[in-house]
Amino acid sequence: MVVIAIALFACVALPGAHATSTDPIEKVIQMIADLEAKIIGEGKDAQKVYDEFSEFCEDRSKELGFEIKTGKANVKDLEATIADENAKQESLNAKIEELSAAISTDEQDLKAAGEIRAKELAAFEAEEKELVDVIGTLERAIGILEKELAKTGAASMMQLQSAGTVAQVLAVMVEATSLSTADATKLTALLQSSQESEDGSDSLGAPAAQVYKNKSGGIIETMQDLYDKAEAQLEEARKTETKNIQAYQMLAQSLKDEIKYGNQDLDKAKKGLATSEEAEAVAQGDLDVTSADLAEDIKDLASLHQECMTGAEDFEAETKSRGEELKALATAKKIIVEATSGAQDISYSFVQVSMSSGADLANFEAVRFVRDLAQKQKSTALAQLASRMVSAMRGSHRAGEDPFAKVKGLISDMIEKLLAEAEADATEKAFCDKEMAETEAKKADKESTIEKLSTKIDSMTAKSAKLKEEVAILQEELAALAKAQAEMDKLRAEEKAVFDKNSAEMKKGIEGVKLALKVLREYYAKDDKSHGSADGAGSGIIGLLEVCEADFSKGLAEMTTVEETAAAEYEKTTKENEITKATKEQDAKYKTKEAKGLDKETAEATADRSGVQEELDAVMEYYKGIKDRCIAKPESYEERVKRRTAEIAGLKEALKILEGEAVLLQRSSKHTLRGARLQ
């Protein structure tokens, strides 16, 4: 009886003894068996990990080998690219210098032509002013003479008839205040210049005798002759000026075109140079990165080899150590079974501890209650809680812990979670009520504003449409011009597309020939060929490829020249069409002014409406989100509050069940222990 009481006391005192009916020896053997299974499992896992590690070593070694091979090839290609871009940059720099010099020459010629044109214009303006002045003076003098000669019996008539020279006639007119002294002096000089140019005489005497036949009427004929000559001279000067303007415009346009296309070629060359420099920089950067990656790959390959060797050695040592541990456990288990069987029968055959039955009953009663509550409320969270409660009870029994504490903690956590959800739901309800009311007010306001703007826009649009009918003819002419320009644009685009396609093919051919030449030259330049290569035939092929490269380059240059000429002609015609279009649009400007004013107001109103519409759209989008958030839910706020309240109350009831059963179980346990001691 004493032995049984001591054994029972030991089982109660040991942690976990009240939760199992297995005696300590069986527990030790089971623990050894579990440890052996664990070690064997660890060995299998280690073998699997090592197999994966070994496969990784092999794959990574192959991968690094391929990367090293690829990196070396990429380094060679990048070095060749850098050399090619350097050669291209030298060619482009030479072209840029040539184009810059040509453009500078054309700009200087254009400037010189402009200076010459300015001098010609100044000379023409001075000559034109002088001739216009002379013509005006002659007109006034002829008018005065005709008026004076028309008078009969006057003293002025007698004086004019008695005058012997032109100077005397002009003096008479000046004295009679019919002609100013300046005009008289100018006419005298003009008559003298005319007479000298005709007969070479330097005298300022009277004109030939036939000038004064019919008395004084000859002076009018003389002045009329001078007037006609001055008119002819003025017309000739203006014709000459027109020719000079046309010649200058043609020369200036030609120089401007040369400068324009020269600048285009210069821009292309500079862009090509920048592209080449960028390509070289990219290639250099790639070369640096590739070289660094290559060195890193070589280093990684060496490290990988060392790492894989170390891993193999570690796995071998772990496998050996694991075998030794299994051997020791098997020996210990054999000794325990053989040496303790008798003592085990004496010590543990009559003692059974059944203290856990009361705890299990209490816990399972709480679990059943929570499951019923979950089914009633259709709550997935409560169903999951019941499952966790079962798991917690079983784990606590195996570990010798208090099963009530763990389960109480789970229930308390769920209650706190539900309370937090209730608080968050209430906050969300207040937010939804406020946002729904404000959003609906904004929606009504925006819709009212849009309706007013729409009415105003419709009214202005109707007035504008009526005004626009008056300019339909000019719009048709502009449409025809636009159609013609569009057809020309289409033709130019087709020509450009053909050029782009053909030039791309030519460039592709040139690059292909260059690449083939590069390959052939590099191969036949090598000295370490392992067979007798056909160097002579290879040289012939290289020569033919060089001829092809020259032909392709020449064809591309000719094709480019044709394209540039066509583009220049297209731009010229387009500019003329633009001038015509601007003229027609100016004709229609005043007729469409009122319509444009209405259109502007309509556009402003439309923009205002669009802005309001965007604001309304934003309000509607937000309103939709608020409704989805606050209305479109499977259950209402009141239903959620009711359900959550029932869940919290049920969980609190489950806690009461656990607390009541815990008290009863403690009393039952004490009674059982006292009974054991009495035996």
Image (cartoon, rainbow, N blue to C red):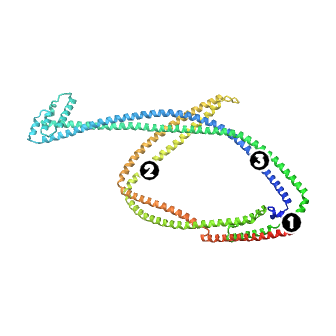
* Image location of residue 404, percent across then percent down: 74, 66
Q: Quadrant location of residue 592?
A: bottom left
Q: Label 1 vs label 2: CA separation? A: 116 Å
Residue 67 shows up from this direction = yes
Which amino acid does the dot numbered 1 rest on?
A: Ala
Q: Is residue 32 above or below residue 280?
A: below
Residue 483 tag number: 2
Q: Nearer the viewer, residue 360 or 163?
A: 360
The residue mark sitting in front, 3 or 2, is 3
Residue at mark 3: 50
Residue at mark 1: 5
The residue mark sitting in front, 1 or 2, is 1
Q: Is residue 619 above or below residue 586?
A: below
Label 1's element? helix
Label 3's element? helix
The residue mark sitting in front, 1 or 3, is 1
Which amino acid does the dot numbered 2 rest on?
A: Lys
- What residue is shown at x 78% (from left), y 61% (from top)? 399
Q: Is residue 612 above or below residue 301?
A: below
The earlier-in-sequence mark between 3 and 2 is 3
- Quadrant occupied by the C terminus: bottom right
In-image side of 215 versus 507 (left or right): left
The earlier-in-sequence mark between 1 and 3 is 1
In-image side of 67 versus 589 (left or right): right
